[in-house]
Image (cartoon, rainbow, N blue to C red):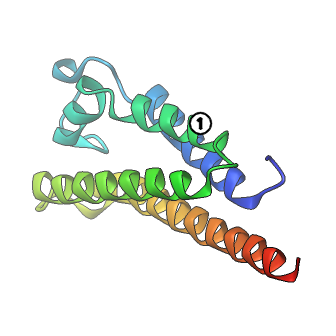
């Protein structure tokens, strides 16, 4: 399970979300809106976005025997991240680039880790199907 590279990518994704949970204040009104996530912070803290994503990804690591389910869950998380990114761009469209960089990098790194996980799950499926043909 842990030897598989996609498990490491999914663990890194969960770790990024856990770091996001720790780094963002839980009290949005008292924090400054010019922070990294700005007005998108409400979606992260009030709706437990990072907690849910990290929990789903950690559960998804242990579904290594069900690779199609893993891929469907990762695709759903990617879709949620795309909508989150679009909302982030809409809320922070005219801000300074340095402030927006950390929020943008979160979505970019998360999306890359999801795509790499899906890619390596597909490679595992191809290896399994080729070994089944040889039997």
In this orientation, which residue lies closer to the viewer: 25 or 13? 13
**With respect to residue 130, does 114 lie above or below?**
above
Observer-nearest residue: 37 or 17?
17
State the image coordinates of residue 62 (x, y, percent, origin top left): 67, 39
For the question of whether residue 102 can be seen, the reply is no
* Left or right of residue 55, residue 9 in this image: right
State the residue at coordinates (53%, 35%). 19
> Which residue is identified by label 1?
58
Dot 1: element: helix
* The C terminus: image quadrant: bottom right
Neighbor class of circle 1 (other Cα within 10 Å; few <14, some 14-19, many 20+) is some
The x, y position of residue 41, in whole percent, is 25, 35
Location of residue 13 with respect to 119 vertically, above or below: above
Work out whether 95 lies above or below 32.
below
Q: Is residue 80 above or below residue 133?
A: above
Q: Nearer the viewer, residue 109 or 125?
A: 125
In which quadrant of the rendered view does residue 107 lie? bottom left
Residue at screen point 33% across, 34% down: 49
Identify the residue at image location x=56%, y=65%. 118
Residue 85 image point, x, y percent: 26, 57
| Left or right: 49 in relation to 28 | right
Residue 110's spot in the image, x, y percent?
47, 56
């Amino acid at each position: 399970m842990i030897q598989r590279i996609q498990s490491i990518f999914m663990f890194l994704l969960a770790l990024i979300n856990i770091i996001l949970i720790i780094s963002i204040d839980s009290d949005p009104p008292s924090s400054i809106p010019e922070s990294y996530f700005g007005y998108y912070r409400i979606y992260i803290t009030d709706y437990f976005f990072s907690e849910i994503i990290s929990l789903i990804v950690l559960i998804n690591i242990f579904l290594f025997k069900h690779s199609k389910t893993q891929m469907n869950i990762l695709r759903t998380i990617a879709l949620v991240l795309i909508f989150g990114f679009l909302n982030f761009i809409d809320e922070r469209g005219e801000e300074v680039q340095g402030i927006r960089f950390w929020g943008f990098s979160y979505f970019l790194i998360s999306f890359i880790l999801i795509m790499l996980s899906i890619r390596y799950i597909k490679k595992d499926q191809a290896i399994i199907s080729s070994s089944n043909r040889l039997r």
